[in-house]
Image (spheres, rainbow, N blue to C red):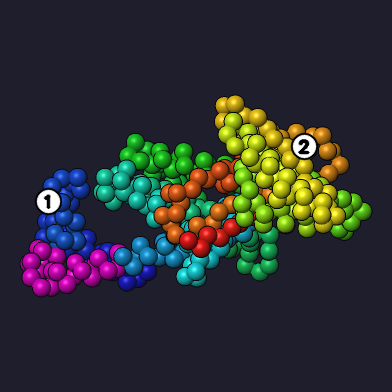
Amino acid sequence: ILLLMVLLAGIAYLVRVYGVQATDPGQPGYQSVLSLLLAAVSGRGVFYYVSMVSILLVLALSANTAFADFPRLCRAIAQNNYLPHSFATRGRRLVYTQGILVLGVLAAVLLIIFGGVTDRLIPLYAVGAFLAFTLSQAGMVGHWRRVGGKGASRSMLINGLGAFATGVTVIVVLVAKFAEGAWITVLLIPALLLAMGLVRRHYHLVFLEVRSMTPLELTDTTPPLVILPVQGWNRIVKKALRFAFKISPDIRAVHIDCGQGSEIFRDEWCRYVEQPALAAGLAAPELVVLPSPYRLVLAPIVDHVLEAQRTNPGQQIAVLVPELVERHWYHHLFHNKRASVLKALLLLRGNQRIVVINVPWYLDA
């Protein structure tokens, strides 16, 4: 602190001696006071450029402090459920990636809004910094009041005076710089507090809903009703059916009849599914054909699943969704995404009794 005081006093003295005056940051040819002072003292020689590069490195280091500590602060807040838990998770580089990304985006947004002129951010910085000082000093007053002991009254007085002084500074800056950007903090800080409160409330409600203080119940182990959407007979459907037979004898295949090839599929189903199942002494899966004159595919399947869970109140519904898994990125251009959309619709419109199981088929081509 003493070194900073000496440097600040020296700069103030030299600025007065050399008659250096600050220029408008928004004007062309703008230079900082330090740049003008260095040019006045040493000229535009090597020393000037070495000094300016050194100042740049110091500023970069100070900016890096925010990227080092802000993610840690977010981690501490997230561990108390006031921020999404992703802020408390380390990335593969052993840093809190989420906090770094959010800080980078927010910094970029502020620079864009204020036209890249950092001087216009000073009111925001002043309010935020002195508000943090006020809260920390007030927190220490509460700490000494709670802990007590020898010297507690003296410490409370010192921290109380500090909280009062910084609090007055916050009010002065807010009033003086309100129109220059300080109003943003007046809106932003309460909004952040409200958002954090809502995040904590959400996590608390989720905890109350999913927690369990009872042992595992195994009284009802009725196999689920397996529903398998099928559009044709192929190796993917064969794999899904084999898995379905392993988890339940109650299997229902749902085929959407869009007016093309349904009779051919019925014959294939009888030949390739029903007859082999009966020959093996198993109940043949039920084939349900849903007409769709307007060629809708996903909506009838979702409606059928919801109707099945209403008509089978004592049974879980397991929906098997066959899906192609492409090896190369360009393969995604050749196949539709009905399986992914169907899973999303079932998850959005489903309930606790509907289970969605993915049956992948990995393409080798």
Q: Which dot marks residue 308? A: 2
The residue positioned farthest toward the top in the image shown: 293
In the image, residue 221 sits, relative to residue 26, either above or below, namely below
Secondary structure found at label 2: helix
Residue 168 can be seen in this image: yes
Residue 132 is situated, as x and y percent measured from the top left of the image, at 48, 54
Q: Which segment is the magenta one?
A: 38-59
Instruction: Please name the amino acid that badge 1 sits on.
Output: Gly
Specify the principal SS of the magenta part: helix
User: Horizontal placement of 123 versus 210: left or right?
Assistant: left
Marks 2/1: CA distance? 74 Å
Label 1 packing within 10 angstroms: few (<14), some (14-19), many (20+): few
Secondary structure found at label 1: loop
Q: Nearer the viewer, residue 207 or 129?
A: 207
Q: According to the image, label 1 marks what residue? A: 29
Position of the N terminus, as image quadrant, is: bottom left
Q: Are marks 2 and 1 in contact (CB under 8 Å)?
A: no
Q: Nearer the viewer, residue 26 or 210?
A: 210
Which residue corresponds to the image point at 35% horizontal and 71% vertical from the top-left? 2
Instruction: Please name the amino acid that badge 2 sits on.
Output: Ala
User: Horizontal placement of 127 versus 33: left or right?
Assistant: right
Which residue corresponds to the image point at 46% horizontal and 51% vertical from the top-left? 332
Q: Is residue 32 a member of the stretch shown in magenta?
A: no
